[in-house]
Amino acid sequence: MKWLVSKDARRFSAAARNESTAVELVAQPVQIKLARFERRLRRWKRAARSELDCRNWARANFANLSFYIPDHLDTVERIDVDEVSDKDFVERFERDGVPCVITGVTKDWKAETEWTPQRLLDRFYNEKFKVGEDDDGKSVFLPFNYFMHYCTSGDAVKDDSPLYIFDPNFADRSRNNTAEDIKKRDKEKKEKRRQEKEKEKEKELKSDKEGKSGSIKSEPSSPEKRGRNSNTDGSDNQQEPPKRLKTIDRSSPAKSPEKEETSLKLTYKTPTSAPATTAPTEPISPTSEKIDIPSSRPTKEMLADYIIPRYFRSDLFQYTGSKRPPHRWVVIGPKRSGTGIHVDPLGTSAWNTLLTGHKRWALFPPEIPKNMVTMRGLPDHEAATWFVMVYPRLTDPSTIDASGKTLADRLGIINLIQRPGETVFVPGGWHHLVINLDFTVGVTQNFCSVANWETVWLKTRNSRPKMSLRLLKKLSSFVEHPREDALEDRLVYKGLVETAKMLETVPQVPPSSSDSSSSSSSSSSGSSETEGASRDNTESESSDEDGRCLCRKCKIRRKRRNGTLGVPSLRIADSRVSTK
């Protein structure tokens, strides 16, 4: 496909560019073995985006473009968390479904100081984070030290849409991944398995002895019958058969001392003082001195580093139990990574807080059809591709009408630049996409509140019936047996239960793009910055008349399900479609 880049894609604000100074990620380069890193990186890239060859990740040269926008296009309303009450926020933004940016949320967060690139590297050096899914739906994980090297001096500098940490399970991993701790756990597991095997052997020997003693008692007691198991004095003394000794083949030639030394080196750890004839080790990235790497901490500790903003603490989905779908993500990514256009699942709203770096957002109202803000034939779901190929068409001067508005203005687009410490509120049903303008670290969560209960309940009842029943049962218990500290909330829960029962006669909501999601940048993770829906229900921004995505990755997945992957004729047909 020929990549067309308009002049609008190259325009940017000088003020915004000066504001986004280069971030010094780490004090020293990450120490890794380059050969091993490059080998594993190719494997991770093939798994996360099998539709691309490792050499095609920079085919569009997006690294030469700037994705900043002029300041006057950032028209979203900004509020201070200390100046707007909870009631005013619900009335002004949440109930009417109006996006906004909230400032002052992170002033009491530990993440302000603990989520810098250097501190994250110190705390989670060996921990693995999810960066996507392969064609079979299995998660792709990267060690954090490898990811930081990828962002600072690896391929992320030139990749069009780099790999992006988008981990929904960071709060569930309570055990660290440090090498020493893994060896200790493996040793404990081996010792436990050895003890279990010994117990099984003892049981088998005991059962064998009991069986043999029973058979001996049933036979006549005579020296001839007893044979050699009887002693000369006529007493029975059944002995355990001797263990079979390991025989040594003396005929084989003896190993030379040099070969024995080589075999020991392969079996055990390499000695500190290696001889001069030892093969050279793999090159290590240049550093001044070898630094001591601290023990990694479990990623669950990140959950204690931030506090849910007070506007979003009444999350009704917290009563759905342990099988609640993914609802919170830690998001870390380099420049040009991000999430494609999508709508949050089940009608939920979301908040997204940025600690480091800058993000660019584009949002469209819920009433706008998805096919109006996308185009057919896009090669992938990446945010960078959308901003280069779709956004210029929506803002093209040829689309200006008599009122002086472009097509994007008539569709109600909201552009904004998110800065460190700012929290973006995304109401349910809004189409949105995000691209990182530099290295970013943030956290996002989806939630269901009283304001959007009706929409969320209808979608949850039809998409997740078992979860909806658990939620309704829990809310009903609050009405029948209210807690002493929540007597005032009894009327609220009662109204929610009555609304749910009243909606029983409402027909099922037809599936639409509102329930769809897009992949995160270069990860196809099945979850975007504020979503957790299944990838199987995804409708791409480039789809055919049947709603099937035409990007190469989705076509490969369909072929795997149909068992036709590898058929030459289908490969040729696929390549023809992808180049239209």
Image (cartoon, rainbow, N blue to C red):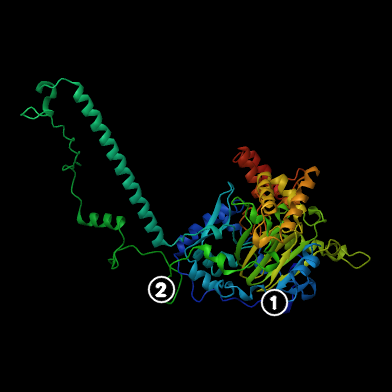
Q: Please state if 264 lies on the left or on the right of 483 as rendered.
A: left
Q: Is residue 329 above or below residue 579?
A: below
**Percent x, y of residue 421:** 66, 74
Q: Is residue 145 above or below residue 200?
A: below
Q: Amino acid at mark 1?
A: Arg
Q: Amino acid at mark 2?
A: Lys
The residue beneath circle 1 is: 17
Circle 2: element type: loop
Observer able to see residue 240: yes
The quarter in which the N terminus is drawn is bottom right
**Percent x, y of residue 166:** 60, 60
Is 240 or 116 nearer to us in this picture? 240
Tag 2 or tag 1, which sits nearer the N-term? 1
Give the Cα distance between marks 1 and 2: 36 Å
**Percent x, y of residue 455:** 77, 53
The residue beneath circle 2 is: 290
Residue drawn at x 19%, y 41% is: 247
Q: Please state if 260 lies on the left or on the right of 528 as rendered.
A: left
Rate crowding at label 1 as few (under 14), some (14 to 19) or many (20 or more) other CA atoms within 10 Å.
some
